[in-house]
Amino acid sequence: MSETLESEIAALPKMNLAQLQAKWRRGLKQAPPSHIRKQLLVPLLAYKLQEQAYGGLKPEIRRRLRELANSFNRNPKTAAKRLADPIHIKSGTRLIRQWEGKTHQVTVGESGFEYNGESYKSLSAIARLITGTRWSGPLFFGLTGHRR
């Protein structure tokens, strides 16, 4: 970030609401959002100034955000479960897990996983085979964190 932009952004929290709105009008050549408190206007203006200086979001990021918003609008209860990008593991990667004193090794393939010479479509199937109970495969192999 340039020193000028950095100092400009650093000065924003010291401004009052009227000064922030005037800066928005001057810098962005448009009216500021109405009825927004200073606490929200400061980061919004900082973002807009950086966006103006360095460019906005890439088209693919904008598209993904639109998809996520549409997904929430259609079905807010289940959308959160499907929002996270799927875990991408490079083909050839070996996943190793100790379970009850035994080391288990899984090799990631192009279209699935290999464990003990057998092919599986999901890590969860392998985790179930190893433990005898239902497990999230990515969680079992340490690819995702525990959710509380």
Image (cartoon, rainbow, N blue to C red):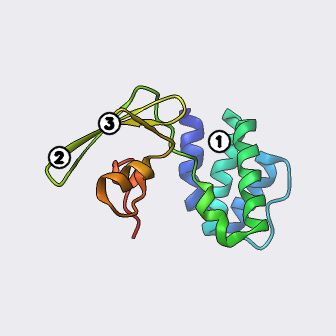
Question: Which mark is in front, 3 or 1?
Answer: 3
> Distance from label 2 to label 1 (Cα)?
53 Å
At horizontal 48% and vertical 46% (from top left) the residue drawn is 122
Q: Is residue 88 above or below residue 76?
A: above
- Quarter residue 128 falls in: bottom left
Would you say residue 1 is visible in this rendering? yes
Under tag 3, what secondary structure?
A: loop
The mark nearer the N terminus, 3 or 2, is 2
Q: Which residue in the protein does label 3 denote?
A: 116
Name the side, left or right, on which 92 lies relative to 84. left
At horizontal 44% and vertical 52% (from top left) the residue drawn is 124
Q: Which residue in the protein does label 2 denote?
A: 102
Name the side, left or right, on which 35 lies relative to 143. right
Q: Position of residue 92 (x, y in %)?
A: 41, 26
Question: Which mark is in front, 3 or 2?
Answer: 3
Under tag 2, what secondary structure?
A: strand
Q: Amino acid at mark 1?
A: Gln
> Distance from label 3 to label 2 (Cα)?
13 Å
Residue 77: mark in rendering: none
What count of labels does the image hold?
Answer: 3
Q: Amino acid at mark 2?
A: Lys
Q: Amino acid at mark 3?
A: Asn
At horizontal 44% and vertical 51% (from top left) the residue drawn is 125
- Quarter residue 63 falls in: top right
Q: Residues within 10 Å of mark 2 (few under 14, many from 20)?
A: few
> Distance from label 3 to label 1 (Cα)?
52 Å
> Dividing the image into 4 quarters, which one contains the N terminus?
top right
Q: Which residue in the protein does label 1 denote?
A: 50
